[in-house]
Image (cartoon, helix red, strand yellow):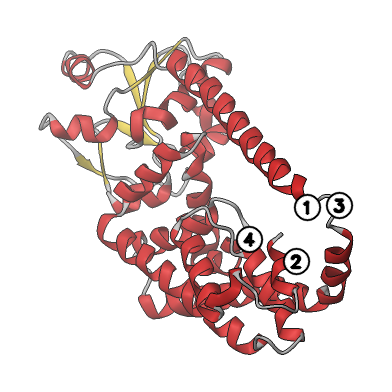
Amino acid sequence: MMIATILNPTPHAWWDFGYLGVAGCVFLEQIGVPIPAFPALLAAGALSVSGEMNFALCLAIAIGASVLADSIWYVIGLSRGGKVLNLMCRLSWRPDTCVSKTKSFFSRYGTRTLLFSKFVPGLNTLAPPLAGMSNVRYGEFVAYDAVGALFWATLPLAAGAYLSESFKRLQMQAHSIEAYIPWVCGFLVVGVLIWNFIQRKRYLKALKESLQASISVEELKRMQDAGESVVVVDVRDELDARANPITLPHSRWIPHDTIENHFSELPLDKTIVVFCDCPAEQTAGSVAEFLREKGAKQVRPLVGGLNGWRSKGFEMVPMNFDPAI
């Protein structure tokens, strides 16, 4: 047990790195490595009670390491934008929602999202690159991010300090089960991974079914040139649309997170083509499935989305940010 080892009055083998250990754990977690910093901060708070570490210095180091890691993501978002978000999206078990929920938070709260993002799984790593992608001023980013890191790091440090005596008593009682703890933790980790794998397989199967009626950019262009009746809907979220304010001719912009409020405005008896700029048309596929459930006769996600249309050299038009939608 890491906490037991750290609280042992003999030299702390794991904690020989001291304050560097605090900085390393915080930095690695914030940069995206699956190494939780909470136990390390909890232990540091407990050690501050015995005088082996300084509470204020641990807090300052945690904030600094967090802001450093987040600044790296900020710069990546500023320079790479949607590419890094799409990469994160591909690694998620539910790709269509991994980024969209974060974007919804950021659209609603702006830079204030950084004040609570570290307490929300997924939002933690995605918020800094979104701030860069949204061209938030770096000084403003650092200010909000540092305050958010202050709240986030204070909680486990204070909890560790408060519970230091309880940890010592727990250590004395834990010897009988100490050998089983690694096995229990291992089974829990494997169980979570298997559950996420099953959920991802189910989602991808449903997505594949929703994309069976997809349409190519060439076919859509032919239909538009022939004057056929087809309704084209751009379902990109507001952040993506404003970052890349061009779209297909004769299309209407309805962000996917508002589709439930506006689907009744669409002619569900006509052919509807939906497109996005996300990996594998995931958002378009989800919207298509939703519209089918609401009674749409024929909904066809556009293969390649906005980028596929643009790569063919077909006409693009400026976005019409209709305040009514």
Is 54 placed above or below 271 here? below
- Name the residue beneath numbered marker 4: 119
Asked if one can make out residue 266 in the rendered structure from this viewpoint, the answer is no
Residue 178 — which label?
A: 1
Q: Distance between the residues labelled 2 and 4?
A: 26 Å
Q: Where is residue 177 drawn, in percent x and y? A: 83, 49
Question: What's under tag 4, amino acid-wise?
Answer: Phe
- Asked if the residue at tag 1 contacts the one at tag 3, i.e. Cβ–Cβ closer than 8 Å, the answer is yes
The residue at the point 29 percent across, 16 percent down is: 215
The residue at the point 76 percent across, 85 percent down is: 49
Residue 4 — which label?
A: 2
What element does badge 3 sit on? loop
What element does badge 1 sit on? helix
- Asked if the residue at tag 3 contacts the one at tag 4, i.e. Cβ–Cβ closer than 8 Å, the answer is no
Nearer to us of marks 4 and 3 is 3
What element does badge 2 sit on? helix
Marked residue nearer the N-terminal end (3 or 2): 2
